Amino acid sequence: MENQVVIFDHPLISHKISILRDVNTGSKQFRELVSEIAMLMGYEALRDLPTEYVEVKTPITTTKSKMISGKKLAIVPILRAGLGMVEGILALIPTAKVGHIGLYRDEETLEPQEYYCKLPNDIANRLVIILDPMLATGGSAVAAVNFLKDRGCKNIKFMSLIAAPEGIKKLTEAHPDIQLYCGCIDEKLNENGYIVPGLGDAGDRIFGTK
């Protein structure tokens, strides 16, 4: 599992996550921070994008220089909190296609229920990065990967800002072939399935709802 899970220890990410946790951080700043952290994490998560040499004419001469090959990338936020991470990734790769998976967690069973799924037609041919700020029980993450694999996706990564050990275990055991990127790992889940210490409900804090 060690090679499958990347935990970021960059001081900028740690600093921004600490501000996210603060109950006094308002929705505007919260949204900005989520996007900024996603961009910082995306820089590393996209490290293995394929490149190719192309000819470029500089003001001095003509040279061979590396560019991303194919640009076959799709980002798929899990609604609704995952939307907060989209802008940060698009800032890095503006040509990426965006799909959406809508899931909600049943309050009694804590199991994910699908209510929306819209993906690019050629999703199976793309590197897919699933976005969700919180990896808690892992149920929604596993379900999202299942949906993508059912549609032929073979190259999938998952990005979360904060993860619980229980969620990491469930996702990596169910899908040992995907790469997982986390801003940090928290202590545990509480009896209601929320991450401790966590930062509360990410969706509510992004969109200012209760």
Image: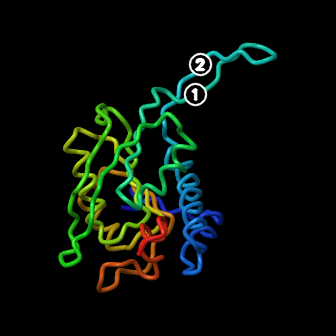
* Label 1 packing within 10 angstroms: few (<14), some (14-19), many (20+): some
* Label 2 packing within 10 angstroms: few (<14), some (14-19), many (20+): few
Q: Secondary structure at mark 1?
A: strand
- In the image, farthest residue toward the bottom: 191
What residue sits right under mark 1 in the picture? 67
Residue 124: x %, y % from top left:
28, 35
Residue 19: x %, y % from top left:
60, 73
Return the mark for residue 100.
none
Question: On the rendered image, what quadrant is the C terminus found in?
Answer: bottom left
Residue 27: x %, y % from top left:
54, 68
Q: Nearer the viewer, residue 91 or 185?
A: 91
Question: On the rendered image, what quadrant is the N terminus found in?
Answer: bottom left
In screen coordinates, is 197 left or right of 65?
left
How many tags in the picture?
Answer: 2
- In the image, farthest residue toward the front: 209
Q: Nearer the viewer, residue 2 or 90?
A: 90
Q: Name the residue at 56% across, 59% down.
A: 37
Tell me whether circle 1 and circle 2 mark residues in contact (CB < 8 Å).
yes
- Sequence-first disc among 1 and 2: 2
Return the mark for residue 54.
2
Give me the C-alpha separation between circle 1 and circle 2.
7 Å
Q: Nearer the viewer, residue 154 or 109?
A: 109
Q: Name the residue at 57% across, 70% down.
A: 17
Above or below residue 121? Residue 90 is below
Residue type pointed to by label 2:
Val
Q: Name the residue at 80% across, 17% down.
A: 59
Above or below residue 110? Residue 60 is above
Q: Secondary structure at mark 2?
A: strand
In screen coordinates, is 170 left or right of 24?
left
In screen coordinates, is 74 left or right of 47?
left
Residue type pointed to by label 1:
Met
